[in-house]
Image: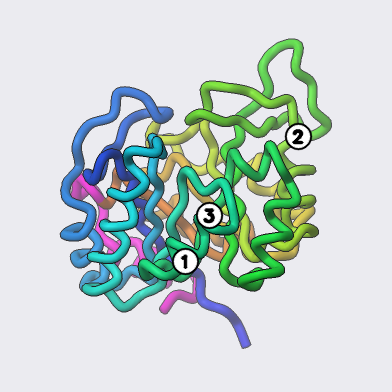
Amino acid sequence: MTVSVRVIPCLDVDAGRVVKGVNFANLRDAGDPVELAARYNKEGADELTFLDVTASSGNRETMIDVVRRTAEQVFIPLTVGGGVRAVEDVDRLLRAGADKVAVNTAAIADPHLISRIADRFGSQVLVLSVDARRVREGVPTPSGFEVTTHGGRRGTGIDAVEWAHRGAELGAGEILLNSMDADGTLAGFDLDMFDRVRAEVTVPLIASGGAARASDFAQVAHHGADAVLAASVFHYGTLTISQVKEQMRAEGVIVR
């Protein structure tokens, strides 16, 4: 059976509001997360992803409230990430209504957090979010891409392809691969980076960063994406979920 490629709007949430910028900088308000989630649910989104972009302790309770209110109104899978540092954080988000939880920075600091979460809740609950960029001078990695933290502002020196592979081995059920170079630029997905990771991981791979045209989604799907994720083009009305799916169908991609 051929699996459909999922279309996932991403809502970057800061203090209870959806925001969006370029390369995670110059953030501007994009609306109420619960209202946007309900809209995307009606428009045919296959899943939703919420990322707490500041993830301060003060915003954690705000995000849990957003998750709870959203889960009451939408009936598609909801992934939540940002500030997840412990197994207990995953438990709280799942109890609030999340279906899956994304980990990023905390897993870099403690890779076995991935296996602890997977062992307790199952791999299907866990998404490893990888914010990657092309390496800067003096920071060579085997693939030419490195993992970053803090919205792409801090390099780690960790090879992005090797990290995605290790994360899957430790128990991540999916990899969310976000190009920090392309994020918010509307320049299209970084297919070179995506291909390198796709060749090394067998778990579902979500492509993120840079989508501008409906054809961009179809293109990365043909490169092996199991799901395509975007924010700006949906929030500001450049594209609708149905337009993206229609284009993907027209280019031979199976969608729901």
In 3D space, how far apart are the residues under numbered discs 1 and 3 (Cα atoms)?
A: 30 Å
- The amino acid sitting under disc 1 is Glu
Residue at which label 2 appears: 159
Residue to which mark 1 is pinned: 251
Q: Is residue 248 visible?
A: no
| Residue with the mark numbered 3 | 102
Q: Nearer the viewer, residue 98 or 120?
A: 120
Quick one: label 1 or label 2, which is nearer the N terminus?
2
x%, y% of residue 154?
A: 58, 22
Highlighted magenta segment, given as a residue range: 235-256
Could you give the CA–CA distance between mark 1 and mark 2, rounded to whole angstroms? 33 Å
42 vs 85: above or below: below
In this picture, residue 112 sits left or right of residue 70: right
Kind of residue sitting beneath label 3 = Ala
| Vertical comparison of 127 with 163: above or below | below
Can residue 24 be found in the magenta stretch? no
What residue sits 74% from the left and 31% below the top?
158
Q: Residue at x 40, y 61 (%)?
A: 8
Disc 3 to disc 2, C-alpha distance: 19 Å
- What is the x, y in percent for residue 243? 29, 63
Q: Residue at x 66, y 45 (%)?
A: 107
Could you tell me which secondary element the residue under label 1 belongs to? loop
Residue 255 magenta-drawn? yes
